[in-house]
Image: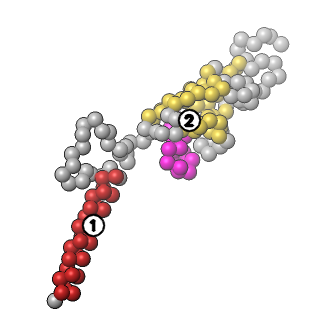
Amino acid sequence: MRRNARHRRRIADLKRVAGILGACVLYFCGCSNPPGIKQSPEVKQPVGVNERPTGSITASPNPIRVCADALTGVTNLSWTSNRTLIVEVHVDSPAGPLLSRTGSSGSTTTGDWVVNGQVFYLQDASHDEPLTPLTTIASVTVKHTQEGCPPD
């Protein structure tokens, strides 16, 4: 009899522990609050699954004025994003060469290597996911112009 009672107590203890662990998992993944604990209104809930990061990236000047035989130019890129912790700016493709890695906003000036039609991609790098079009927040295409150049 003693063995049977001990066995029932162990099972009851295991059920309690499983219930507590389950409540903790749900709480920390943002699925619900543990029973008896109310969320204070000033605490923000985790970002929902359907809430994708948003943002923009701009280039100035765009278009870049290139004169004579020049094939490249310099531009300043500025970006801002929402619902991100870390963003990266990549060149030519979502996983192309890394130009910059910052918090949710930033800026950088390129060297004299920007070609006509070069695309810069603002990527969400908050979760160490592969950089693909799915992690692209925004992009900007930089063009060239000869407007304002002295005549040949």
How are the residues colored? secondary structure
Q: Position of residue 35 (x, y in %)?
A: 20, 54
**Identity of the residue furthest to the bottom in this view:** 1
* Dot 2: element: strand
Q: Is residue 97 magenta?
A: no
Say few, some or many: other residues with alpha carbon within 10 Å of mark 1 (under 14 / 14 to 19 / 20 or more): few
Which amino acid, mark 2?
Thr
Quarter holding the N terminus?
bottom left
For mark 1, what is the residue? 17
Residue drawn at point x = 65 percent, y = 40 percent? 98
Q: Please tell me which of labels 1 and 2 falls first in the chain.
A: 1
Question: Considering depth in this image, is 93 or 84 the residue closer to the camera?
Answer: 84
Tell which tag, 1 or 2, sits nearer the viewer.
1
- Residues in magenta? 121-138
Say few, some or many: other residues with alpha carbon within 10 Å of mark 2 (under 14 / 14 to 19 / 20 or more): some
Residue drawn at point x = 54 percent, y = 38 percent? 87
Q: Is residue 123 magenta?
A: yes
Mark seen at residue 75: none
Residue drawn at point x = 26 percent, y = 72 percent? 14
The answer to whether the residues at label 1 and label 2 have Cβ atoms under 8 Å apart is: no
- Seen in the picture, residue 138 relative to 13 is either above or below; the reply is above
Residue 143: quarter of image: top right
Question: Considering depth in this image, is 2 or 79 the residue closer to the camera?
Answer: 2
* Dot 1: element: helix
Q: Position of residue 134 (x, y in %)?
A: 51, 46
For mark 2, what is the residue? 102
Question: Considering depth in this image, is 93 or 77 the residue closer to the camera?
Answer: 77
Residue 26 visible in the current orientation: yes
Residue drawn at point x = 68 percent, y = 28 percent? 110
Q: Position of residue 113 (x, y in %)?
A: 74, 30
Residue 25: quarter of image: bottom left
